[in-house]
Structure formats: structure tokens, C-alpha cells
Image (tube, helix red, strand yellow):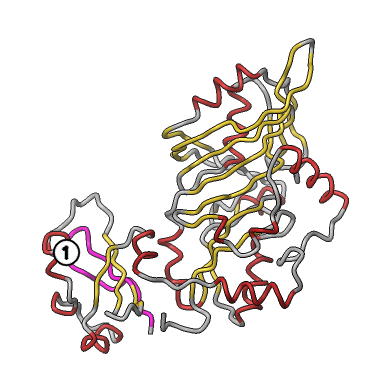
Amino acid sequence: MDVSPVSGILPYAKHSGITSFASLGCIKKALHTKKVGHTGTLDSFAEGLLVVLTGSLTRLVPYFTLFDKTYEAVISFGEETDTLDPCGTVVRSAPLPDAASFERAFTSFRGNLMQRPPSYSAVHVNGKRASDLAREGRAALLPEREVAVYQSDILEMRFVQEGGRSRVRYARVFFHVSKGTYIRSLARDLAAACGSAAHLIGLKRTKVGCFDIAQASFSDMLGSFTIDSVLSRTQTESSDRSGPSCSGDKSAEDGENLIRRSLMSFDRQAAKYCGLGLLTLRPNRRFDFANGKTLKPDFFTDFERFPRSLQAPLDAQSEPQAFAVFLPDGTFLGVVERSAQTGKLAYGFVIH
């Protein structure tokens, strides 16, 4: 792809104990660029897939953030923390649930749900992050919003005896969710539904849209994700505040080389995964396109394939439909969007 030597898509495996921001710093250093954008962060305690866009492709971030995601999580029952993760302070304790209560509650958290994001989150309140307000002692009660749980499974449970009965102490679960879903909030609400309290002690993102953790650089360094491994790692990290490096056990040089090798181009297949339509620009129209000339049907070799979708108004409630524009040789040039009101195409952005 002839966009820039450092423009591309990087599936990156973040390690627990390091922030997403620090991970971006490693990527910037490896690619010698300051132009790096994430398509959804992971909390410091979490691990797994970050899909990072670099160079000119950072303009695609709004399209990538629409993807659904899959996670595995380890829930610790009996105590809720203010952050809903292992880094916070315990604010509530409750009895452990029995297996039947937990399983009943778990199956009820499928489909469309109303969810309240955690007070410690990236949601903005009057222009300020909710997490920043919470750290200042001004935690905000965030409004509920609709999310979707497409699939969920209980993968593993660990029991203890309490009051002469077997109770669930830890559970490892799987969720396939829509954008904007907080797994920490799911754990909180699940626990409340079965008369308990809970927080996450482990979280691993395994997919973002079509991108899988197996594709990610450094994914081989993550190790297993089980109740035992998460408990062991939590204890280790609490005693070792230095945290892991961005490249795991690899040397800095080897890590940077791996990042450069792992960079993927944005091609027609990737555009389809993003939910974008495809248009091919006639080579003799490249100058006009690059300079923002009014878009006309004859700019595109395949425009006639979309006479309805590109020349008729959409329903007024619909979002504009977006199309990735390529040259015949596969060079990505930008995105155009179709107006919901007029059906006409307008520039989203152009890569020069």
C-alpha cells in the first residue's frame, strides 16, 4: 500500500500491568512516528488485543471503534471495589453465590441490556473523564446506556465451602459484546443479580471485529489465561511494581523489529471488515479526488454497480453509508460518505 512507510494496521498484544498509552509509546518508537491511534484501550490490569492504526490510517479510527469485541474474564466474588478491578479499594462485601444462582443470573445477561459504565472509565462528563473525577473524590453516577451481549459462556468455576454449602469464589467467563460494553460493569451487575458482590481480577480481549489475538505481535508471550494463572499473576504484579516491558521477554530491538514486521496494509478485504463499501477510482481522476473536486459518478469505474445505493436518498433516520476508495492497483485513497438526506457522495477524508 503506497500511503506511507509507517501507515498500517497493527494487531498488538498488550500485557497486563502496562497501560495502553505505554504500549502506544513502544509502537511509536518502533515505527519512528508520532501518528498512532488506538481503536479502544484496555485497562492496565487487562491483557489482550489492541488494534492500532498508524500514519495516515489513523483517520480510520472512527470506523474501527464500531467493531464488536470478545473477552475472557475472571470474576472474583464476595467483594466489590470502587474501580471494579483488582487495583481499587473494597467498597462493599456480600456473601458468595451458589452455582445455581450464578448460572441463572448469567443466562439472563444476554441480548440487549441497559448498562451503567463504571465511575472509573473513559466516559466524559462535562468534558472531563469520569475516572479523573473519581480520583479527585467527585465520582459521577453515569447514565445507563444500551449495550448488547451476543454470546456468553461460563468456562470455569472455583468453589469454596461457606456456611456448609459450596459457593462460587471465582468464575472465568466469555463474552461477545457490542462496542461500548464494559465487562467490569457486567461482573458488578451479575453479582448483584445473584445476591453477591464482585470485581474483575483478570480480563483478556481476544477479538476486535475480524482481528484475532492470534494475529497480534507478542501474543505468544501472553501465556495461559485461567483462574489459577490469573491469581498467580495478580499476586506477582502486586509485589513487583516495575511491571513488564512492552515487548515481554524479547529484547527491545527484537520487539521493535517484530512490530515493524507485523504492520498490515489497509486493503479491500480490511475495508469490508470495517463495514465499508468499495469504490474504485479511475486513475485519471486521482488529481481531482486528491484536490477535493466535486464527486461525480464517472470518477469511479464501478459506480454503475450501485445505482440505487449511491443515487437515491436513504431513510432520514439512517446513517450515511461510507465507502473506501481504491485505485485499480489497490492503493487506498480515502473514504467517501453518502448523505442520508440526498443520497449524494461527499468526502470523508483523503489520504495524500
Query: Is 330 placed left or right of 98 in the picture?
Result: left
Query: Is 285 placed left or right of 324 in the picture?
Result: left
Q: Identify the residue shown where x is 58% and y is 22%.
A: 103
Q: Identify the residue shown where x is 79% and y is 16%.
A: 162
| Tag 1 secondary structure | helix
Name the spot of residue 173 as percent of width and height, x first.
Answer: 60, 35
Q: Is residue 69 visible?
A: yes
Q: Quadrant of the C terminus?
A: bottom left
Query: Is 188 placed left or right of 115 in the picture?
Result: right
Q: Toward the viewer: 119 or 201?
A: 201
Residue 310, compared with residue 256, is above or below; it is above
Tally of marks: 1
Query: Is 327 placed left or right of 157 in the picture?
Result: left
What amino acid is labelled 1 in the image?
A: Leu
Name the spot of residue 251 as percent of width and height, x first.
Answer: 76, 73
Name the spot of residue 241 as percent of width and height, x first.
Answer: 84, 56
Which residue is the site of mark 1? 310
Segment tinted magenta in the rendering:
335-351
Q: Residue furthest right?
A: 239
350 inside magenta stretch: yes
Q: Is residue 128 visible?
A: no
Name the spot of residue 316 as percent of width and height, x first.
Answer: 20, 52
Q: Identify the residue shown where x is 82% and y is 51%.
A: 237
Q: Identify the residue shown where x is 66% and y is 53%.
A: 47
Residue 348, compared with residue 72, is above or below; it is below
